[in-house]
Amino acid sequence: MLLLEPPRPDPAPVAVHPVAALADAGPQVAPDKGHYEPSAIALMVTVHVLGVLGLFLFPPTWPLVALCVGSYYLRMFGITAGYHRYFAHRTYRTSRWFQFVLAFLGSTATQRGALWWAAHHRDHHRHSDQERDLHSPLRRGFWWSHIGWIVHSSSTETRWGNIKDFTKYPELVWLDNWRLFAPVVYAATLFALGGAPALFWGYFLSTAFLWHGTFVINSLCHVWGSRRFETTDTSRNNLWLALLTLGEGWHNNHHHYQSSVRQGWLWWEVDGSFYALKALEKLGIVWKLKSVPERVWTPGAASESVDPAKTADGGAAAIEALAVAEPAS
């Protein structure tokens, strides 16, 4: 289920889930195994319906529009800078308290916990656009890659063997197990501060947009855009999707060299998450932001493309190393 799984009784997941077995297993997500979860689909439909209903119950005003957009981008930062660039790829370091803030903020986007998200994403990079990819539009079609896989029973469990570098933190495991906690707190706070209009615009409508804003990177960014680098997958760069996702639209750059905190590599490649992280670096909240080596990001270096199947600093080997290395915080 998307969010309604019962919590696990033991906060130490390695004791519950055999790590070796998970490490050897292929990705859990496949349309021919399991079934679509009624509760997950019901949640998706409910959020969309209430979001649209809010447009009629509470006609748009500039403050409500600003709340919707602000809530969208605040939580998009939790996904892009937190779930993706920190938990999945560890492209910078931070303290334990801010690590929790990132996990909590990302969880308010109602896309499961940080450990679930990052563990599945690491599998995507291991097998991008191959048969064992979690959500390849090339292999299983556009709608499966966009939304089908996340409402499917085979995507329910956190792949603990992929995220051993963060399971030592009980607060992160707790958030992963209690996946409704952060969204409920966030929605309740909006209601307390602004009543029903704030709840409908700031949570329901904003979350519906946020889901699709995130999902287009799995789907559209593998079929629409330009390719600077000849990677082993179909990843593409797309300015419009980068604007919607605080820089995640530079997907071909990212798949060419995934270890960089920066995904927009040239001056005109807008990357909002990177700019925000640079500001946080100046405040001393994050540090050791990993850059892109000159040999990688220079446009003329396309002929020296980093092979994601072989290269330790930019490819699948980097994913394997993350799960056994010390955490970045």
Image (cartoon, rainbow, N blue to C red):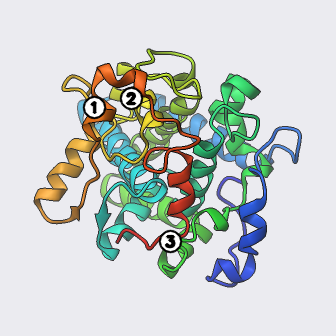
Q: Earlier in the sequence, mark 1 or mark 3?
A: 3
Q: How many marks?
A: 3
Q: Is residue 182 left or right of residue 222?
A: left
Q: Which mark is residue 166?
A: 3
Asked if 310 appears above or below 221 in the picture, the reply is below
Q: Is residue 304 left or right of residue 44?
A: left
The C terminus, quarter of image:
bottom left
Q: Residue at x 37, y 68 (%)?
A: 328
**CA distance separating discs 1 and 3:** 28 Å
**CA distance separating discs 1 and 2:** 8 Å
- The one nearer the camera, 217 or 131, is 131
Quarter-of-image position of residue 286: bottom left
Q: Residue at x 67, y 84 (%)?
A: 10
Q: Which residue type carries mark 3?
A: Phe
Residue identified by numbered label 1: 265
Q: Earlier in the sequence, mark 1 or mark 2?
A: 2
